Amino acid sequence: MSIPQSGGGPIERFEQLAEYMESGCKPKSDWRIGTEHEKFGFLTDSRAPLPYEGNRSIKALLEGLRDRFNWEPVLEQDKIIGLTRNGANVSLEPGGQFELSGAPVSSVHETAAELQNHFDEVRTVTEGWGVGFLGLGAAPDWQHAEMPVMPKGRYRLMTDYMGRVGTHGTQMMYRTSTVQVNLDYASEADMVKKLRVSLALQPVATALFASSPFFEGKLNGHRSWRSRIWRGLDNSRTGMLPFVFDSGMGFQRYVDWVLDVPMYFVYRDGRYINALGQSFRAFLKGELPALPGEKPTLSDWADHMTTVFPEARVKKYIEMRGADCGDQAHIVALPAFWVGLMYDDAALDAAWDLVRGFDAETREGLRVAASVSALAGEAGGVKLMDLARAAVGLSHAGLAARGQGEERLLAPLVTNLETEQTQADRFVAAYHGAWKGSLAPLYSAARL
């Protein structure tokens, strides 16, 4: 989840909303790669979730990283809820999922090095604690009541709202983990092409990175339960955004959609003010019930943009949001996959040729099929295995054209395609075989 935005003066013209997005346009020489991943902390002796407070806790880990590795603390109501250092952030998801939002870097090799450094620091701090971390898309055993609750006002508001608008919202908040990459665009037209390709190919990412076949101690009937959860959350702010593929798509059209999404909150003076279900359009007019007579700032707009959760999201960059978290190699493979497709013109053009004929029904059908069957899924006459092979091939060519040797970081995806098995498939096979129906071995098999 995003941290509160800062900076930016009052919104005085409606055009500023689209201009905010347009300000993210960069020349290709300035494009960067920002990778985020979440992971579940657990106590190795009991396999219980890592609590927020105590000797073995999230708080103790944050304080250890602060004291030993020069991270600056992020506080909310005097509670440590995150860290920042040199453009990177450590933050907490609602159920204590421990997230690294990496600094913007120039190559996927730098992403891999940053990730390794993060794991080294975390292991150094927690040495001897009996603490581990899981790279899975959904918590395999834990019930909702077992999950710790992080001391963040945003999450208290969201928890209440999620319980009223969908069927799976609190599952998403407290018991899922993802890996995503944030990538730049050069212009409005470049944003539109990248957003269309990324939305159409998110089911491929969901399939290739599927790692959540268990939930509440049993098989859940899906290879990516995390993806299934997102289909039962809040249709006003999630999904495949069919309007993106209409003529006339651009910054303003995306702004119009975000404006129609009900608000969660307004952040003022270190606290979250409840604006659940209220309208940002009313806020622009000074008619927000939560803050009568007050008009928003650009920071309020930036905050509101973080409360929409489509499969690919635009802010001042595009976020690829379709993948489960997995092992360390898969975490690195996610940015490699998308950089190869998005940052090479020939690969991007070819990727658009792959998907431009899909209609909205096919795109949504592939999204469902990926969550259920991963690479074995198909919809609208399109087989995800075939589409994934083509997409990974294009990504490999795009990375090779960058000339930095990043294509080798696609290795776990190549293995998945060669074996026609994802992480989830391998876990399920072990569950039926060597694990003899027990999930206890998963805590070693999926440990980061």
Image: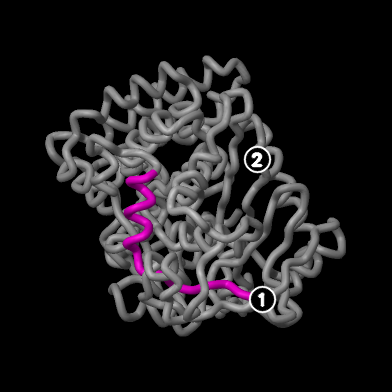
What residue range appears in magenta?
Answer: 252-268
Q: How many marks can you see?
A: 2
**Residue 333 x %, y %:** 52, 37
The residue located at (79%, 69%) in the rendering is 63
**Residue 12 x %, y %:** 51, 57
Q: Is residue 421 visible?
A: no
The amino acid at mark 1 is Asp
- Specify whether 113 is left or right of 439: right
Q: Secondary structure at mark 1?
A: loop
The residue located at (56%, 52%) in the rendering is 37
Q: Is residue 235 magenta?
A: no
Q: Quadrant of residue 272?
A: bottom right
Residue, disc 1: 269
Circle nearer the N terminus (2, 1): 2
How many residues crowd mark 1 within 10 Å: few (<14), some (14–19), many (20+)?
Answer: few
Q: Quadrant of residue 164?
A: bottom left
Question: What is the spatial separation of the Cα atoms under label 2 and label 1, in whole angstroms?
Answer: 28 Å
Of residues 371 and 411, the one nearer the viewer is 371
The residue located at (35%, 39%) in the rendering is 250
- Specify whether 195 is left or right of 85: left
Of residues 116 and 246, the one nearer the viewer is 246
**Residue 299 x %, y %:** 57, 60
The amino acid at mark 2 is Pro
Q: Is residue 278 visible?
A: yes
Of residues 244 and 88, the one nearer the viewer is 244
The residue located at (60%, 64%) in the rendering is 4
Quadrant (top left/top right/bottom left/bottom right) for the C terminus? bottom right
Q: Which mark is residue 104?
A: 2
